[in-house]
Amino acid sequence: MTIKRQTLSYTAGEDELKGYMAFDDESESARPGVMVIHEWWGLDDYIRTRADKLAELGYTALAIDMYGNGATADSPDEAGGMMNAVLGNMETGTSRLRAAYEVLCAQPVVDETRTAAIGYCFGGAMVLHMARIGMPLKAVVSFHGALGSFHTPRPGEIQSRILVCHGAKDNLVPESDIETFNAEMATAEANVKFESYEGALHGFTNPEATERGQNYGLPLAYDQRADDASWSEMKILFDEVF
């Protein structure tokens, strides 16, 4: 297996976006495509690593750019500003999600009938949004993502299987949000699996989370047990849908 890695430039309206694609270059066949959506820090090396891991599993992975020009943040204030600019204008956010999906499906190494999306923190909220608006993804996986809704799906509108991987001690996601999410999904008749990992805080998949939490006074921490367990759950789901 030889993993090919490349920057993939694309547009959404007038927005210039820079994604990162990884896939096994030794295989010429089309294979499932998986979008990867970054944390509030932007499309950084951590997210590229996740795309590489998906390529090693045999998928074509596209880490997408939600901020424009591949921008990344160096501090929580900067990250929050970038994230809130998207969340405050979800019409633009949705157009960026759709543009990235179309770019992924257009790749010769992608079977456009077999696609999925995974996301981390902010990205988790984005993949859930993609499911809520009925994008034709086989599955979406949210890792320590926000659960709030920008669109209330009608019964049958959600086409994707949904996996939510949540840290049981994540106090950035209130219990009330979980209850509201579960009720919303029940009304929408969605196929949802909600996994809660005992003792895990927000950011539990990112090895940099503990240091960042300490540096910035944020309730973040890496948890290898939860990281491994959630990745395994994702692989099981993808084996089922693909």
Image: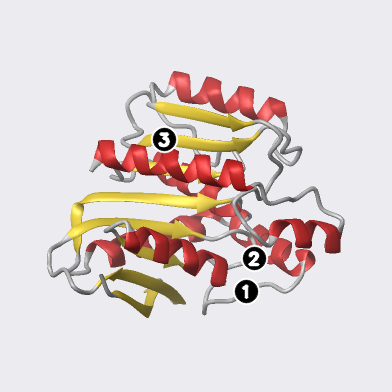
Q: Position of residue 212 (x, y in %)?
A: 77, 62
The answer to whether the residues at label 1 and label 2 have Cβ atoms under 8 Å apart is: yes
The answer to whether the residues at label 1 and label 3 have Cβ atoms under 8 Å apart is: no
Q: Position of residue 123 (x, y in %)?
A: 54, 53
The amino acid type, in three-letter code, at marker 3 is Ile
Rendered position, 67 above or below 181: below
Judge left or right: residue 84 versus residue 65: right
- Which of the 4 image quarters holds residue 76? bottom right
Q: Which mark is residue 162?
A: 3
The amino acid type, in three-letter code, at marker 2 is Trp
The residue located at (68%, 39%) in the rendering is 200
Q: Earlier in the sequence, mark 1 or mark 3?
A: 1
Q: Which mark is residue 41?
A: 2
- Is residue 104 among the parts visible in the rendering? yes
Local packing at callout 2 (Cα closer than 10 Å; few below 14, some 14-19, many 20+) is many
For mark 1, what is the residue? 72
- Which of the 4 image quarters holds residue 89? bottom right
Q: Position of residue 36 (x, y in %)?
A: 44, 58
Judge left or right: residue 68 versus residue 96: right
Judge left or right: residue 65 versus residue 169: left
The amino acid type, in three-letter code, at marker 1 is Thr
- Is residue 144 among the parts visible in the rendering? no
The residue located at (53%, 48%) in the rendering is 124
Rendered position, 8 above or below 154: below
Q: Earlier in the sequence, mark 1 or mark 2?
A: 2
| Distance from Cα at disc 2 to Cα at disc 3 | 24 Å
| Distance from Cα at disc 1 to Cα at disc 3 | 28 Å
Q: Earlier in the sequence, mark 2 or mark 3?
A: 2
Q: Quadrant of the N terminus?
A: bottom left
